[in-house]
Image (cartoon, rainbow, N blue to C red):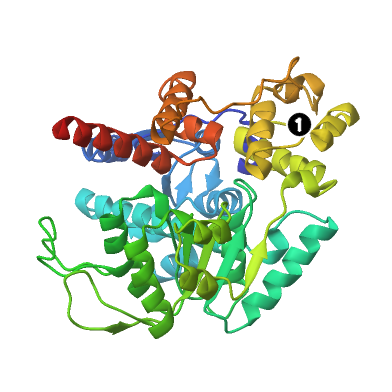
Amino acid sequence: MTISASLRESAATRPRQRATILVADDEKLIRWSLRERLAGAGYDVVEAATGAETRAAFANGVDLVLLDYRLPDVEGFELLHEMREAEPDVPIVMLTAHASVEHAVQAMKSGAFHYAGKPFGLDAVLLIVERALENTRLRREVRALRARQAESPSIDKIIGRSPKLRRVKELIARIAASPASTVLVTGESGTGKDLAAQAIHAASDRADRAFLNITCSALPASLLESELFGHERGAFTDAKNRKLGLFEHADGGTVFLDEIGEMEPPLQAKLLRFLEDKSLRRVGGAIDIHADVRIVAATNVDLRDAVRRGAFREDLYYRLAVLTVHLPPLRERGSDAELLAMFFVERFNQEFGKRVAQIHPDALRMIRSYPWPGNVRELRNAVERAVLLADAEELGVDDFSMLAAPAEKAPAFRLPANGIDLRDLEHDLIMQALERTAGNKTRAGALLGLNRDQVRYRVERYLAAVSRQKRQE
């Protein structure tokens, strides 16, 4: 039986914290000495004396092979070819008592990582093993990086075919190709504003430069200023070293400012100056620094209303809103909910090792008719839960029971006669969400349309306000 066939038959893989090395040699003393040296260096060692034993051990999963040139029942090069075909990432080191230039060349051409003639020094073999494993680790990291780059959001990867979304994608393509330095993305929470920002960057001539993002509500104003503009050493108590801000790091690229409506007025003024002059000054600095950055700002609040209330600078609003992309809520996108549901089913099938093949038509009708107040984010969470708990190849109505309409509509909230403290109300809602999710900030944030950092920041802000009030009393 070939190694490829054995690998297909091996149903289980065992998790390992340490690298496992297969020593395949027909000489017992050599296997023993290698095992002792490698085990002493922290590796797990599996031994094989024949080709059949080598195939079986390799099929169980190893990280490196020390392979004898000639085993009793098979030539080492035959095994080398089988192993390389089955698992090309596993490095193979050929060992032989018949060392020659021809054998070395043949081994390297056949895909061996290294070639060593007997007798060999155990320390030398250990060094080869370490180099081979490091080489494999780096190769896998590069492959993963390339895969992530290939999967970077682009316009075509914004899922949906409804007329409203098609118009949004056309607008994003035109904006990406333009020289505009500011873009405003609006829409309800969960509509994918961050994905739109990444798509603008990926489709632009800035795609080969940095894309950095920050949530404006996740940090206090002083820390947010430092994150965006950087600071000089000694600018404040903990500024022990100079720090470059996001705008400097993203020079030539894009910075995504999420929840821009939460930015404090003094920082809004500094941001406006940067947008006008393309120059910044680090906190505590005295030198203007030029940075060519496209700003994509996002908000789920009405900035025009915020301007009328004096909560947002009018001049900054008009500077940001030169080009505006509005993402429609999922309830206005027709059959996009069904398309997205199947997209997420495929994603979570891969992530959880499931085999969900379809969604029952009744469940699809439920998905399409549900208003999705949390938009795409809520849909993603619902499908994730359904796939994770699924025990069949079809998702039915029962798998989306969380979408069932409540038996009775909750009464509309009425403002008490004596008013209410909005900060207390916000804190009470966050505490209820944390209680419902057993203190899990990520899940609590999902219930409230916030991320984990936003939940933490709001709790800390409330506690700081309570502390100040007590000191004043």
Q: Can you give x and y, in whole percent of width and height, for residue 93 in the image?
A: 40, 54
User: Can you tell which quarter of the image residue 353 is in?
Assistant: top right
Badge 1 is on which residue? 356
User: In the image, is 167 to the left or to the right of 60?
Assistant: right
Point out the image quarter for the N terminus.
top right
* Amino acid type, label 1: Val
User: Residue at horizontal 42%, vertical 24%?
Assistant: 431
User: Residue at horizontal 36%, vertical 52%?
Assistant: 133
User: Can you tell which quarter of the image residue 377 is in?
Assistant: top right
User: Residue at horizontal 49%, vertical 69%?
Assistant: 314
| Mark 1 neighbour density, 10 Å: few (under 14) some (14–19) many (20 or more) | many
Q: Can you give x and y, in whole percent of width and height, for residue 295 in the image?
A: 49, 71
User: Residue at horizontal 87%, vertical 28%?
Assistant: 360
Q: Is residue 208 above or below residue 117?
A: below
Q: Is residue 368 above or below residue 299?
A: above
Residue 272 seen from this side: yes
In front of the other: 100 or 198 = 198
In front of the other: 94 or 406 = 406
In front of the other: 67 or 275 = 275
Q: Can you give x and y, in whole percent of width and height, for residue 364 in the image?
A: 85, 33
Name the outermost residue toward the front: 417
Q: Can you give x and y, in whole percent of width and height, for residue 449 in the image?
A: 55, 39
User: In the image, is 83 to the left or to the right of 18?
Assistant: right
Name the outermost residue toward the top: 407
In front of the other: 4 or 11 = 11
User: In the image, is 163 to the left or to the right of 410?
Assistant: right
Q: How many marks?
A: 1
User: In the image, is 100 to the left or to the right of 357?
Assistant: left
Point out the image quarter for the C terminus.
top left
